[in-house]
Image (cartoon, grey):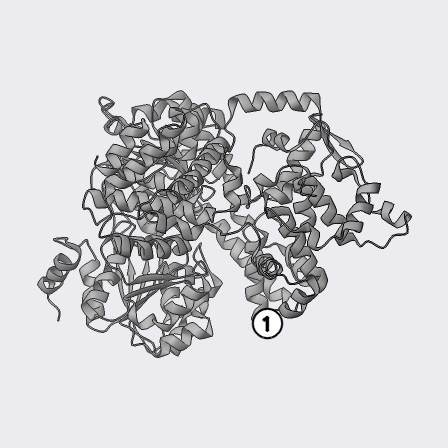
Amino acid sequence: MISETFLTEKLQHFFGYNSFKDGQAEIMRALLAGHSTLGILPTGTGKSLCYQLMGKILKKPVLIVSPLLSLMQDQVEQLRYLGEKKAIALTSELSYQHKQFVLQHLGEYDYVYLAPEMLQKQAVLAQLMHISLGLFVVDEAHCISQWGPDFRPDYLDLKELRQKIGNPLTLALTATATSAVESDICQQLFDTNEVPKIIRRSVDRANIFLAVKEVTSQQQKNEYLLQLLPQLKMPVLIYFSSKKKADELSQLIRAKTSLRTAAYHAGLAKSDRYSIQQQFMQDQLDVICATSAFGMGINKKNIRCILHYHLPADLESYSQEVGRAGRDQQLSLALLLFDPADIKLQRQLSSNTLPDDLEIEYYFRHKGLDHKHSAASEKELLLEYYTQRAMTPEKIRLIFKRRRLRKEEKLQALINYLKSTECRRNFLCAYFGEKRVVQHTVTCCQPAGQPLVLKRFLASKRDQTAASVPHDYREIIAALFKM
Amino acid sequence: MFAQEELLYFFSQTQTRRPAVVRQVLANKRTVSNLFWGMQYQILDWLNTQPQMESLLFDKAIKQLLRQAKLEQHPNGLLLTAKGLSARTQYAALHYRIKQPQLFQRLDEKMWEDVLQLLVQVTSELAYANKHYYVAAASDGAQAYFKRWFRTAKQQLQAATLGKMLLAFLKDKPTREADLFMAFFNGHGVVAATSAQLADKSNYNISDIVNLWRDYAVSFAWFLLHQDTYFQALVAPLFKQSLLSNSTAATYAQFLKGALPAQIAKSRKLRLSTINEHLLEAAIFEKNFAFKRLLSATEIEFLAGIFTGPPSSWDYQVIEEHKKKIDFFKFRLFQIGRSKHDL
Ligand SMILES: [Zn+2]
């Protein structure tokens, strides 16, 4: 048995922290005892530290399968920031020469991030068979489950790919998983004779007050937001489901209040995205109007409020997004602005990503989709995946019908949450299949129909002593180069 | 992408111009025909100033300008209207226009912009002896290129030297523009503003801010290229030696050594028509192009006899009517020579 002291010493030595967050040490002990593990830890509990430290202790390469390019790059940046030079994201963004170089020296990297489709490439697999991996990590493991909201068909091949490289010690990680998703992950990833350890920590966060404000129109929503926002403790992160709205509201907030705000979404230039993250980290921004593209790599501890301007996709995304508040354990607010008309919008958004019967028929007749419509390429990829596996149109129709149904169920669960007159925190625990029961009080959450009391979340006096940013070019140059 | 009104700069009230040529010159689509007409329109300085331009957006903007009667359709292209001219003048008074467009065809702009951000950030952190920071968003290629230079320059690199270079470069520029340019850099304890934030603070729009930054960035590269410091070694490899495309440059090198088109075609294993295209490109860009090695005195005399007026209005058909055998290549060469007043 590996002692806690041993692990803590390593943690101190490599990362400079004095103690683990809940769940981290248990995961590492299981792995060091040779058990493959599924870790279900809420956002902000340092999931990536588990495999980062494992790499240091085992002194062997760690391979991380991750679904999102931006996520991988953030993680690599973070490792480099910690002084780890041998980390790489093996992505299509690398030049051909660079990719060849990385492939030939794969065993010399400490951390290799890649997307599942990269793992399917023969050249990559061939290299991996020659390397003695310390740990195989499946990040965002819920993507493997057809029951989950972010199902990615290429995750289904991971079991087979993992077998090909000799079933290495594996850590699957996710922030949220209902019990159905949990058992699905185990089944889809591990052989029947393997029994992975499951380490789960509650999604419930005692320092985050959950509330919903119902409004009857867009107009009313904007008015409420503009009136509330200047009174709140900062910083605030507002989630939108469209880039356009994020831009619009960011402008409106700038025009009508003295708050410093910026919009953040995938439509911005890379350099602008970098600047906004830095400004936010350095407290030069009060409010960020973001799409779900924001937050992946951001580790800001003192976010005081998460506002949802639109409905989130489902309770899984909701609890992840809300989990970005109050990582410093201080009291924080999660407030969702709910206009019943938004339900229709969210229903459209979620069905938009899946091909319908007509599109499936069109695809089979023309071997492609009409690109006049948005999201066509995403749907095409999905269809391509299934046809490559020799599935008939009927079978595919059925798959997507089922998935649409699943999405509708998820949306219904979200609506039930919004309208719940019981404790919202208990609702979430039950939804994720946890046995935990919270003792509800007025400071715990605001169930539907109860008054919304926000006094504890308001700033007593707006702090206007924000550090002044130099504007004169000579001052900027002097500050940059210590002249 | 240029703003809609900015496209008016590329049209004239007297010379009909084809929008496709304008678009392809801005996007650096280098066919001889595009280059030739770009030269006739006197917009070749703007070659490659909009490499990312989407033709759909460009076409939409032109349509809009036609609808607003700022441009009008003629059989051979578009003309700027009086209304268009006044819109252009109004636009010019309020917005930023690139001042050094000709540098964009000489420099690997994308690479340099990333390298410049890295240079400022890394040097700034060095000034404060800080090693722990998130590196600004830059492509892998730019990071690798920068690292190679940095390894050799590190020993002598002084943060103040870069500061002094920037101060010297910005000294004679309008202060307001210099402020906007410098607001775009990240460094130790200094966080860049976004283009939207700068647009908000100034009277410019986002497209102005982006153009200003690009213009100042490439001009600073040009400035560093002519200063005797270790930064020279960082910028020099990013500048092109010649304005010709690589294959054209190879052809032209042989031509300069005295080879004739047919000989070049043979030695380079290319078709004669391809070599002729290369020579036309060289004739457009090169100073002192030896037109008379390809056109005889009698050919020049004949062509000068039947063609007068602006070269862009000449019609090759006229030669055929004179039953004289002069191919299109020579006709176009003569046209280029006359346009440059080299013949
Ligand atoms: Zn409660």
Mark 1: amino acid: Ala
Looking at the image, residue B93 lies above or below residue A445:
above
In which quadrant is the C terminus of chain A drawn?
A: top left
- Describe the element under mark 1 as helix, strand or loop: loop
| Residue B50 visible, this orientation | yes
- Residue A181 rendering spot, x and y as whole percentages: 39, 60
Q: Return the residue found at the far left.
A: A5
- Residue B77 rendering spot, x and y as whole percentages: 75, 36
Of B250 and A88, nearer the camera is B250
Position of A240 compared to A391: left or right? Answer: left
Of B334 and A360, nearer the camera is B334
What residue appears at the point 68 percent right and 58 percent down from the top-left corner?
Answer: A362
Which residue is under mark 1?
A390
In which quadrant is the N terminus of chain A drawn?
A: bottom left
Position of B245 compared to A274: left or right? Answer: right
Residue A16 in which image quadrant: bottom left
Of B240 and A184, nearer the camera is B240
Residue B179 in which image quadrant: top left
